[in-house]
Amino acid sequence: MKKHILFALLGAFLIIMNACKKSDTPPLPTANFTFAPENPTTQDEVVFTGTAQNAKTYTWSSSPTALSSTQLTARQRFTTAGTYQVTFTATGDGGSVPITKSITVVEAKPTVDFAFSVANPITRQPVAITTTVQNGTTFAWSSSPAGFTSSQQNPTFSFATAGNYTLTLQVTGAGGSTTVSKMITIAAPSLRADFTVSNPNPVAADVVTFTNRSTSDARTFAWTSTPEEGFSSTVQNPVFAFRSSGMKIVNLVVTDEFGNTANRSTSILVQRRLVGTLVALISSSESRGRLIATSASTSLSANSIFYLGNRDMPPFVSAGTVSCNGQVLARNAINNAYVNNSMVFNNPTISWAVSGSNDIPAINFDTNKPNPPMPDTTFPSFTNLDKTNGFTLQLANVIPCDELEVFIISTDANNVRISTVSKIFQPNTTSITFTGAELANVDDRFNFTITIEARNVSFTEVDGKSYVFRNVATRAFTYTK
């Protein structure tokens, strides 16, 4: 009987204990979270990492609204700067536990890059810049060396001087400033001006053709002459007839598509247009062509128009009778030889006669003027003209003559005259100086000759036509490259 009572009491106790266990409250969850980076910008993605116990679900939220997630780990980029209250809530059988923390988001610094539209530009060539930028609102461009500034996002620039330039862009936004620099090399243009002249020693009113030989990048052409007498052209290969005699400097300026320029000048010695020129040559083996001798008995036709002095291509090429501009020249006596298309005279008594009507007797000229002596000088020993300081020629004594002139004549590899400069001695002087400026246009890349020419001259006028008689002596020295 006692055993039955004991078992009954034990069963009642177990029932009471089970009832007590079923009435216990579940524990609350524990929660926390971290985030990185701790000081984010509007460009950063923030990673929120939650930790929790006794939780089954999770929620993320923020104020102002931006963040929303139900994962234990959440990611969010806050595109607007400010302070956000971020709340992580862990929920379990025992309830929900929210954890709130503040996070401050600041504006990001600008990010920037730029590229040039032309990798290897030349001077004055426009180069466009393409800029990629984030978080930037203002732009400040500069260059070193100085020469370029702009406040545009995508400007265009050019430089007139070749060299290396560093271009710098500073971009400013709400988050601060960012500076980027890049170097670009501006090359010198290959533009070169050059031309040839059909006749570098024409007679006045002769038509001269100028043939452009500039580099292919030349786009425009500007021709002028000094002294000015109407020669001005913009065509590529102009023609022109100089009305007056004397030294003419012809200049060509070419321009490329970007505005770069190059120039080339050459001299042209325009001869007087005379109705015949008779020259008595007092010569030695040093004297070179361009001169023809005459005796006092020579006569000249008033109807003929030709020039037998100072011409590179004389109208006589063989023995016998030849013609010049429709007039027959009878060669009476000559002893000559050709050297490099120039005539060397060894006989100072060569005689010529011109046949035709209305001959002018030689008595009309003062043929009794004395023959000038051969100029005596020591030529400089150099191979290149000093175009900076110039040089001086010194004669041994004063030469009694009407004209005493020095020519510097430059010829190319084909013996074609490419430039000439001349200067006249002052009366009763024995020295003459060429300055660097006067030599600037002399092309001495090949051969050049310095010639002293002394002349006793007489003139006559018949029917409005000019005639000249010259007694000439020359001394020359050629510098061969």
Image: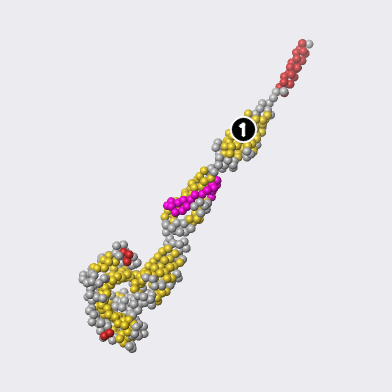
Q: Quadrant of residue 77?
A: top right
> Is residue 31 rendered magenta in the image?
no
Res. 337 visible in picture: no
Residue 240's place in the image compared with 69, above or below, is below
Q: Amino acid at mark 1?
A: Thr
Q: Residue at x 36, y 77 (%)?
A: 203
Residue 423's place in the image compared with 66, above or below, is below
Residue hosting label 1 = 100
Q: Residue at x 46, y 57 (%)?
A: 158
Q: Is disc 1 surrounded by few (<14), some (14 to 19) or many (20+) residues within 10 Å?
A: some
Task: Give the camera-side residue of 167 and 247.
Answer: 247
Task: Give the camera-side residue of 436 and 323.
Answer: 436
Residue 381 placement (x, y as % from top left): 25, 65
Q: Which quadrant is the N terminus positioned in?
A: top right
Res. 400 visible in picture: yes
Q: Which residues are magenta?
A: 132-149
Left/right placement of residue 162 relative to residue 351 reads: right
